[in-house]
Image (spheres, rainbow, N blue to C red):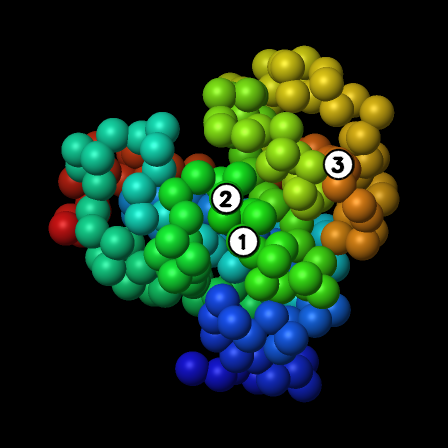
Amino acid sequence: MSTSHHGRYWIRPRPLTGASWAGRRIGILGGSFNPAHAGHRHVSQWMLRRLNLDQVWWLVSPQNPLKQTRGMATLDARLDAARAAARDPRILVTDLETQLGTRYTVDTLEALRRRYPRTRFVWIMGADNLLQIPRWRGWTRILGHMPVAVFPRRPYSLKALVGKAARRYLRNRVPPRDAGGLPARSAPAWTFLDGPLHPASATEIRRKGWWAGR
């Protein structure tokens, strides 16, 4: 469904409609979203402001290779929950990885760059992922594909900022005061944006039995 926002006419992203997104500044927030919650919306709205983005796309993963399948709701259930949680026309819930046929982040980002060559993407991830990204397939290619914005996650932030990835790309770190220009930068470029955390946790939601997705 199309959405009007600030006088712009938006369409749902599809792999072969790259020209429709030319010049847009899009944040990419990937994950299992098992389930999506207010914390995801908080981060997305914060990044929209700090990075001067047009939209944030939630890439609901069919299955994170680093996570167990046990306790994972179906993709349809997670997509439905994500749409209910987004509650902002600038946040677009997608199953693009399913459409693209990709499983690993590095392959997803390469496919996005091919299909949306004139879109200015920023990969958004938590400090926990910055800490563990050296375990990801093709992690240096990930950081070389598009700029990255990192948000704090307790208790990972301090360790992440002295971790392997942060040290390797220390010279490519962008100060927070310049974060608004991050989408226009060439990769590798990354920034760490400290700010208020949201208490919502998908793990805690599942533990308390508040998520019955199947």
74, above or below 135, in the image: below
209, above or below 22, in the image: above
- Name the spot of residue 90 as percent of width and height, x first: 56, 68
Question: Where is mark 2, residue-wise?
Answer: 107
Mark 1 or 3, nearer chain start: 1
Q: Is 67 situated left or right of 177 in this image?
A: left
Q: Counting other residues with Cα less than 10 Å from the Cα at mark 1, is it few (<14), some (14-19), or many (20 or more)?
A: some
Q: Which mark is residue 188?
A: 3
Mark 3 or 2, nearer chain start: 2
109, above or below 94, in the image: above
- Name the spot of residue 112 as percent of width and height, x first: 56, 56
- Name the spot of residue 204 as percent of width and height, x first: 29, 34
Q: Which mark is residue 111?
A: 1
Q: Report if residue 88 is visible in the image.
A: no
Residue at the spot 71% in from the left edge and 58% down from the top edge = 120
Q: Are marks 1 and 2 in contact (CB under 8 Å)?
A: yes
